[in-house]
Amino acid sequence: MIEFFSTWAEQIVLAVIIATIIEMLLPNNKNKKYVQMIIGIYILFNIISPIIKNKEVFSFDEYNIEDNTIDSGYVVDQSSMDKRLEKIYLDELEKKVITIFEINGYTVNECDIDAELDTTKKNAGIHMIVVKVKGPADDKEIYDIQKEIIKEFEIDDDKIGIQIQ
């Protein structure tokens, strides 16, 4: 088997050397890309042909995957992964709300989002967004920001609270 692989490697190296010499001798014209494609097929054929010719060397009929599996005994706790993903998602929602305020020139002291992200539960969705903004603030601008957040997160008016400190 080692002889087979060493012979195979020698054939591949020889094919690559021949291909390199031919490519170096080619003039730079519009036909060069077609010749390079033929050279690539030649190298690919040299890689594949020993496998096709010697099917008994690469026989997988006797190989039983069940005999060679390893059971690590490690079980993935999906609930902890779900909690981490939920935390990351809520953090990203908070960052998005803070960014909306910062774009409009306000500093956010605190942003809390109360949400249930498990869609299998009855009360899934955003329950409340509470944002504490550093004042002074223009009521119309705050109202416009509130409408933007309502539109962005597709929530009701009563689910967002903006406190100016």
Image: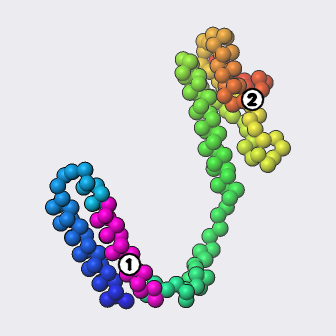
Residue found at x 63% / y 50%: 84
Percent x, y of residue 11: 28, 78
Q: Which quarter of the image is occupied by the C terminus?
A: top right
Disc 2 residue type? Ile
- Can residue 15 be seen here? yes
Would you say residue 25 sits in the magenta stretch?
A: no
Look at the numbered disc 2 and give the secondary structure of its residue. loop
- Between 74 and 13, the residue placed more toward the observer is 13
Q: Using the image, tell me which numbered label, if any, was put on residue 49.
A: 1
The kind of residue on which mark 1 rests is Ser
Q: Is residue 60 above or below residue 25?
A: below
Residue at 25 percent across and 70 percent down: it is 16
**How crowded is the residue under tag 1: few (<14 C-alpha within 10 Å), some, or many (20+)?**
few
Secondary structure at badge 1 equals: helix
Residue 149: where, in percent of width, then height?
67, 25
User: At which x and y percent is residue 74?
Assistant: 62, 70
Residue 90, disc: none
Q: Which residue is tagged 2? A: 155
Residue positioned 61% across, 82% down in the render = 66
Q: Residues within 10 Å of mark 2 (few under 14, many from 20)?
A: some
Query: Earlier along the polypeptide chain: callout 1 or callout 2?
Result: 1
Instruction: Tell me which corner region of the image, top left, top right, bottom left or bottom right, holds residue 35.
Output: bottom left
Work out which quarter of the rendered image holds the N terminus and state it. Answer: bottom left
At x 54%, y 21%, the residue is 103
Q: Residue furthest front?
A: 31
Q: Please give the range of residues in magenta.
A: 37-56
Majority secondary structure of the magenta segment?
Answer: helix
Q: Say which quarter of the image contains residue 17.
A: bottom left
